[in-house]
Amino acid sequence: MFICEQSSKYNVDEGNVITIGLDTQTVFYQPTSFYTGQNIQVIRHPKLDRYNAQFLIVAIKKLVNKFSWGSYGATLTRLRKSKIYLPVDSNGNIDFQFMSSFMRQIENDILGTTLSIFKNRLKDNKLSVSDGGGNMG
C-alpha cells in the first residue's frame, strides 16, 4: 500500500532493497522508497536489481522457513549466523549477473507461455463470436 510522505520524525528507506519481516517471516523486494518499522531488516547491495532480488528472495525464504513463530523465530542474530548458498563467479564473488540473467529468462518463459495462452483464448473467442455461437468464454 502506498502512503503519503510522513513527517520528518520518520525516516524513509530508499528502494531497491529486500526486506525481511522478523515477526512475520516475510521477504519482499521493495523497488521504491518506503517507511518501515523496527522489526523489519533491510538488505542492500549496490549490485541488487529486481531480477537478482527475486533469486535471493527464494533463498532467503528457504532460510526463514526453518524458524518458527514464538520462541525460535527469525531474529537478526539467527539470520546473521545462518548461511544461504548462492552462485559465484570464477573469482569466488557472488554472481549477481548470473542471478539476474537466470530470473530474466524465467520471467520471459512465463510471459511467453502466458501470452500464448491468451492469444489462443482470444483467437477461440473470435471464432466463437464470428461463427454465431455467441460463446464469449
Image (cartoon, rainbow, N blue to C red):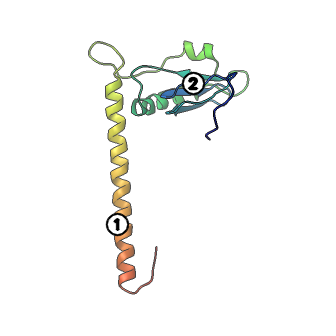
Foreground: 40 or 93? 40
Residue at screen point 33% across, 45% down: 108
In the image, 41: left or right of 105? right
Earlier residue among tags 1 and 2? 2
Which of the labelled discs sits on residue 55, or is there none? none
Which quadrant would residue 1 be assigned to in this image? top right
SS assignment at label 2: loop
Q: In the image, what residue type sits under mark 1? A: Asn
Q: Position of residue 119 (x, y in %)?
A: 34, 64
Would you place residue 82 above or below residue 53 in this image? above
Going by the picture, which residue comes out furthest to the right? 70
Badge 2 is on which residue? 13
Foreground: 44 or 5? 5
Badge 1 is on which residue? 120
Would you place residue 117 above or below residue 59 in this image? below
**Circle nearer the viewer, 1 or 2:** 2
| Contact, mark 1 vs mark 2 (Cβ under 8 Å) | no
Classify 10 Å Cα crowding around label 2: few (below 14), some (14-19), many (20 and above).
some
Going by the picture, which residue comes out furthest to the left? 90
Q: Position of residue 15 (x, y in %)?
A: 51, 28
**Distance (Cα) linking label 1 and label 2:** 43 Å
